[in-house]
């Protein structure tokens, strides 16, 4: 989960507005879930990005950014490289955006760039309508309540929500971003994974075993915007 909030605070003796980032993600393997769920395995029935008319412009852009990083990591490293000039110690001020107070500062970006240069290109993710509907359920739930967690107000978990519209296969994970409606900013912070010691968001994005993705973004009562991204090794859509 990436949280970008905008409180007023005192920085260098002056009142400034900034956004503070908090990251959180969840990944669960079938090896663990097999004790509770036994989904059938079939061929994914998701669609290409171009055919994904069920996605909003922001959701579509998020898929494009994530796939750009997966298929051309070294090129994406140059995008992160450009952000380094906007750091002042731990404060990041991107053009036209509220300053962001990070936990690690430029150090996390340098580490992410090094990772991108060393990683191999992998296949793009195919958007899934059913997984996106499951993600949208969570957006609607949290948008109204202002909550910031993977567990839904009804007690549902990521795998429960996507299974309302189909069946996930092999493995499943979820990233959530709060506080920004810019796809590139969402992708950059998930990849940089500032403040997350195990870089769990980044691992989800670059996991070669994930083949499909569901994305939903919408209004959030506390942070303005929430964007839920669910990844899976495969997904069988329910017939409609």
Image: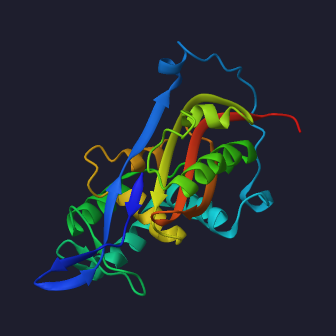
Q: Quadrant of the C terminus?
A: top right
Camera-side residue of 121 and 142: 142
Taking the view exactly as shown, the residue that stands out farthest to the left is: 13
Q: Position of residue 22 (x, y in %)?
A: 33, 56
Relative depth, front residue between 177 and 214: 177
2 with respect to 93 (left or right): right
9 to the left or right of 43: left
Q: Which residue does the image show at 53% across and 12% down from the upper left?
A: 35
Q: Where is residue 137 in the image (x, y as percent from the top left)?
A: 65, 47
42, above or below 114, in the image: above
Residue 193: horizontal and vertical position, in percent?
34, 55
- Total labels: the figure holds 0
Horizontally, is 145 left or right of 38 in the view? left
Residue at the top extreme of this rendering = 35
Query: In the picture shown, does residue 144 fall above or below 212?
Result: below
Residue at screen point 54% across, 40% down: 152
Q: In which quarter of the image is residue 7?
A: bottom left
In the rendered image, the residue lying farthest to the right is 240
- Rendered position, 49 above or below 170: below
The image quarter containing residue 212 is top right
Type of colouring: rainbow
The answer to whether residue 206 of the structure is visible from this angle is no
Query: In this rendering, does residue 102 appear at all?
Result: yes
Q: Position of residue 28 (x, y in %)?
A: 47, 30
Residue 190 or 19: which is nearer the viewer? 19
Residue at the spot 79% in from the left edge and 61% down from the top edge: 53
Tell me which residue sits at (61%, 31%) in the image.
160
Quadrant position of residue 67:
bottom right
């Amino acid at each position: 989960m990436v949280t970008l909030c905008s409180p007023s605070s005192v920085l260098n003796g002056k009142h400034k507005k900034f956004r503070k980032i908090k990251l959180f993600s969840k990944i669960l393997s079938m090896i663990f879930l097999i004790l509770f769920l036994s989904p059938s395995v079939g061929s994914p029935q998701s669609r290409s990005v171009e055919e994904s008319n069920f996605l909003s412009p922001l959701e579509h852009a998020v898929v494009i950014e994530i796939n750009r990083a997966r298929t051309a990591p070294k090129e994406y490293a140059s995008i992160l490289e450009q952000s380094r000039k906007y750091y002042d110690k731990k404060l990041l001020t991107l053009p036209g955006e509220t300053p962001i107070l990070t936990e690690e500062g430029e150090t996390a970006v340098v580490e992410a760039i090094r990772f991108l240069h060393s990683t191999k290109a992998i296949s793009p993710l195919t958007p899934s309508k059913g997984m996106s509907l499951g993600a949208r359920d969570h957006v609607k739930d949290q948008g109204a309540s202002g909550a910031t967690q993977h567990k839904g107000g009804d007690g549902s978990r990521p795998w429960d929500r996507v299974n309302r519209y189909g069946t996930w296969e092999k493995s499943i994970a979820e990233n959530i971003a709060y506080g920004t409606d810019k796809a590139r900013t969402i992708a950059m912070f998930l990849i940089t994974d500032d403040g997350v010691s195990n870089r769990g968001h980044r691992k989800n994005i670059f996991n070669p075993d994930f083949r499909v993705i569901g994305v939903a973004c919408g209004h959030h009562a506390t942070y303005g915007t929430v964007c839920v991204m669910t990844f899976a090794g495969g997904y069988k859509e329910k017939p409609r």
